[in-house]
Image (spheres, grey):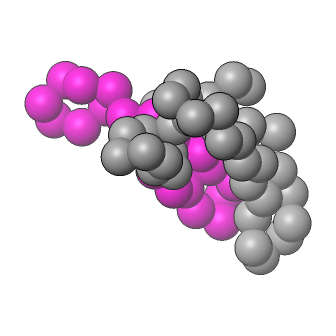
Amino acid sequence: MATYECSKCGMSVNATCGKCDTPLVNDFLKPGDGKKVQISKCPNDHGKIKSPLCCGQDMSCSA
């Protein structure tokens, strides 16, 4: 399961798909500007989300 953690305060979250209740997996998107964007996606192709925010910054994923 993708576990996101804030490097400033230590808050962490786990994410599951709302349609099938399957744990989301860590992945990356590569938009046209060449930068990688960390995301979590449903392994059953129900969608994807950008990493959550905490303390004004993206939370990093440990999975």
> Left or right of 33: which side holds 50?
right
Residue 26 seen in this snapshot: no
Image coords of residue 1 (percent x, y):
82, 39
Magenta stretch, residue numbers: 30-50
The secondary structure that most of the magenta stretch takes on is loop
Image coords of residue 35 (percent x, y):
24, 25
Name which residue lies at 59% across and 45% down.
40
Specify the farthest residue to the front.
9
Specify the farthest residue to the right.
21
In the figure, 51 relative to 17: above or below?
above
Between 56 and 24, the one lying in front of the other is 56
Image coords of residue 20 (percent x, y):
84, 70
> Left or right of 20: which side holds 28?
left
> Left or right of 7: which side holds 17?
right
In the figure, 2 relative to 15: above or below?
above
In the figure, 53 relative to 59: above or below?
below
